[in-house]
Image (spheres, rainbow, N blue to C red):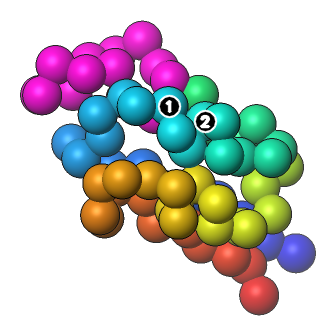
C-alpha cells in the first residue's frame, strides 16, 4: 500500500491555519519558515493522512493544497 498525502504550495499559503483546524488526523501544522509573502506557512507531516480532502476544501487560497490518495 502506498501513501496518502497533501502537497502545500508554500508560495500560496498565508498561514491562516484553517487547514490545520480542518484536518481530523492532525497532519498539518504551521512551520517556522517564512515564505516570500512574509507568512509562516502550513506544512504537511504525517503517515496518518486519509486523503479526506478537508484541508483542500477549507483552504481559502485556490491551488494552495493538493491532496493525493493512494489507490
Dot 1 surroundings within 10 Å: few (below 14), some, or many (20 or more)?
Answer: some
Q: Residue furthest left?
A: 36
Residue 26 percent coordinates (x, y): 76, 36
Q: Secondary structure at mark 2?
A: helix
Dot 2 surroundings within 10 Å: few (below 14), some, or many (20 or more)?
Answer: many
Image check: 15 left or right of 26?
left
Q: Which residues are magenta?
A: 30-44
Q: How many marks?
A: 2
Residue, disc 1: 17
Q: Secondary structure at mark 1?
A: loop
Residue 63 percent coordinates (x, y): 31, 65
The N terminus: image quadrant: bottom right
Residue 70 percent coordinates (x, y): 73, 78
Identified at 80% across, 47% down, the residue is: 24
Tag 2 and tag 1, C-beta contact below 8 Å = yes
Image check: 33 left or right of 30?
left
The label number, if any, that marks residue 20 in the structure image: 2
The C terminus: image quadrant: bottom right
The question of residue 69 being in magenta is answered with no
Check the image and report above or below for 64 versus 29.
below
Identified at 64% across, 60% down, the residue is: 54
Residue 19 percent coordinates (x, y): 55, 44
Residue 39 visible in the picture: yes
Check the image and report above or below for 68 versus 28.
below
The question of residue 32 being in magenta is answered with yes
Identified at 50% across, 23% down, the residue is: 30
Identified at 29% across, 64% down, the residue is: 62
Q: Most prominent secondary structure in the magenta stretch?
A: strand
Q: Quadrant of residue 50?
A: bottom right
Amino acid at each position: 500500500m502506498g501513501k496518502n498525502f497533501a502537497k502545500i504550495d508554500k508560495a500560496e499559503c498565508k498561514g491562516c491555519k484553517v487547514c490545520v483546524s480542518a484536518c481530523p488526523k492532525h497532519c498539518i501544522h504551521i512551520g517556522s519558515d517564512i515564505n516570500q509573502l512574509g507568512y509562516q506557512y502550513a506544512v504537511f507531516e504525517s503517515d496518518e493522512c486519509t486523503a479526506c480532502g478537508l484541508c483542500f476544501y477549507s483552504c481559502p487560497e485556490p491551488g494552495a493544497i493538493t491532496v493525493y490518495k493512494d489507490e
